[in-house]
Image: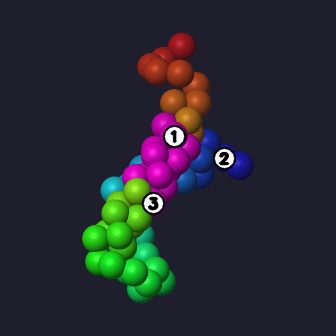
């Protein structure tokens, strides 16, 4: 893989991290049957978990050579 492609994937994952709650909460709302408050809480917890994972992956890609010039 080229360095530019890795940088692009890191940037896409970084912005996907912020869009995760917009995707996971409606998805959980449709798939999980239960009280409304439980659906929202489970959606927020899942969104936080996925956002945390995407954050770690994107920062690992972005800072793979360290910070700043060598």
Residue 41 position (above or below residue 51): below
Is 38 left or right of 46, judged from the image as shown? left
The image quadrant of residue 21 is bottom left
Q: Earlier in the sequence, mark 3 or mark 2?
A: 2
Instruction: Give the CA separation, mark 3 to mark 1.
Output: 16 Å
Badge 2 density bin: few <14, some 14–19, many ≥20, Cα 10 Å = few
Q: Mark 3 or mark 1: name the one nearer the start of the chain.
A: 3
Q: Position of residue 49 (x, y in %)?
A: 47, 52
Tell me the residue that label 1 is attached to. Answer: 56
Q: Kindly identify the residue that appears in the image at 36 percent across and 73 percent down.
A: 39
Callout in the foreground (3, 1): 3
Q: Is residue 37 visible?
A: yes
Q: Residues within 10 Å of mark 1 (few under 14, many from 20)?
A: some
Judged by its main secondary structure, the magenta piece is: helix
Which residue is painted at 46% across and 46% down in the image?
52
Q: Residue at x 51, y 40 (%)?
A: 56
Q: Nearer the viewer, mark 2 or mark 1?
A: 1
Q: Callout 3: 10 Å neighbours few (<14), some, many (20+)?
A: some
Quadrant of the drawing holding the C terminus: top right
* Coloring applied to the structure: rainbow
Query: For the magenta stretch, what is the residue range?
Result: 46-59
- Asked which secondary structure carries label 3, the reply is helix
Residue denoted by label 3: 46
Name the residue beneath numbered marker 2.
Answer: 2
Q: Residue furthest left?
A: 37
> Percent position (x, y) of residue 66?
53, 21
Query: Nearest the camera: 63 or 49?
Result: 49
Q: Quadrant of residue 44?
A: bottom left
């Amino acid at each position: 893989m080229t360095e530019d492609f890795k940088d692009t994937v890191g940037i896409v994952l970084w912005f996907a991290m912020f869009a995760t709650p917009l995707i996971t909460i409606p998805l959980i709302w449709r798939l999980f049957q239960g009280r409304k408050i439980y659906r929202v809480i489970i959606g927020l917890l899942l969104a936080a978990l996925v956002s945390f994972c995407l954050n770690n992956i994107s920062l690992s890609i972005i800072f793979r050579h360290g910070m700043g010039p060598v």
